[in-house]
Amino acid sequence: MAPTAAAATSPPPSIALAAAPAPRKDTKQAKGEPDGAAAQGRPVAASSKRDYKGFVAGVFSGIAKLTVGHPFDTVKVRLQTTDAGRFSGPLQCVAQTVRNEGVRGLYKGATPPLVGWMFMDSVMLGSLAVYRRLMAQHVFGAASWAPGAGDGSGFGFRALLGIWPPYASSSSSSSSSYLPPLGHGLAGILAGSTVSFIAAPVEHVKARLQIQYAARKSERLYSGPLDCVAKIYRHHGVRGLYHGLTATLLFRGFFFFWWSSYDVLSRALRRHTSLSAPAINFWAGGLSAQVFWLTSYPSDLVKQRIMTDPLGGGLGDGARRFPRWRDAAVAVWREGGWRAYWRGFLPCFLRAFPANAMALVAFEGVMRTLP
């Protein structure tokens, strides 16, 4: 789940997601600050009682992400997995898909990720909140883990080694400290690993449905997501459904760049603009998702090649070509050098901002309504 594009990919959490608000004497929160107490340098109470909010709000995030982003994802997967001569580019892919299959063709394979994204974003955002709190409390010794909080500098390596005070705000009159970008990035890796065990089978089924080009269902190997799951399980068991898990774990390891950059961007927007908190969530969420895809896209392309590789056996879908991750990576290189790893990048990159920014808007709205 990734900011998907594929995965891929899943939305950033609220600026005020992880930290419990501290009691404060002032009644007006500074505009554009993620949390009044955190942003102004006051201590934030360490509590796990609000962790549930991330899991609940993540469901709505998944719905928004899929509604906006799935057509982009279909184009991306088709460009990634077909011969170079089939489509001249993303626009031609869209035109050919709509002409031959209608607009619904752009939403092929949407059912599994709709259910999957709701669940995956719930797990990813909820676990991210938990891992941030654990990082803050047990690794960095920080009192707050809210993204964008504090006025500190540095990435957090010295804080991790205990050589430097953990990202303390210069405006704080107490010993409060803030989780640095490094801590947010490490929490992102852990959240990515956690959600990979849900994302791998969902993305596997989605990818196989997306590369079925026949307009008539009778001509397709799989009539739908349930039929796809049933056939793969019948011939290859649970292991077949989890085909590509290792590649999924590697791909989501790049969540480090997503969530660390989200923290950096949130802080910069809070300090240097007068944007409201939802606007900060929107811009930081969309931009950080694009940072993620700029760093992770080649690994996603290899992952898609593995997930659409024939499983063979009684399934009758052909002979397997990539028994290992390295085999798929080498095959891509032989197709066109380093440029081959970036096929389909444009629709993925264009999708990253609106899908994840809108997912964050939905996420934030639910977060604000939950007690």
Image: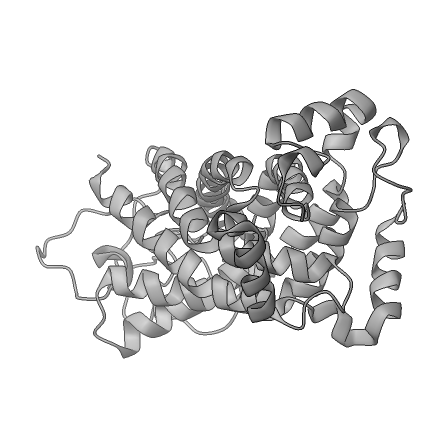
Which quarter of the picture shows residue 274? bottom left
Q: Is residue 103 above or below residue 296?
A: above
Nearest the viewer among 34 and 307 is 307
Position of 335 with respect to 226 (left or right) is right
* Residue 68 vertical placement versus 202 (above, below): below
Q: Position of residue 156 (x, y in %)?
A: 53, 65
Whether residue 246 is situated above or below residue 92 in the rendered picture: above
For this view, does 368 lie left or right of residue 92?
A: left
Q: Is residue 108 left or right of residue 263?
A: right
| Residue farthest along the top direction in this orientation | 234
Q: Nearer the viewer, residue 117 or 103?
A: 103
Front-most of 80 and 176?
A: 80
Give the x, y percent position of residue 328: 84, 56
The residue positioned 88% from the left and 63% from the top of the image is 330
The x, y position of residue 20, in whole percent, is 30, 44
- Extreme residue toward the bottom, this view: 272
Query: Which residue is painted at 21% across and 65% down in the image?
Result: 276
Q: Is residue 178 among what the camera can see?
A: no
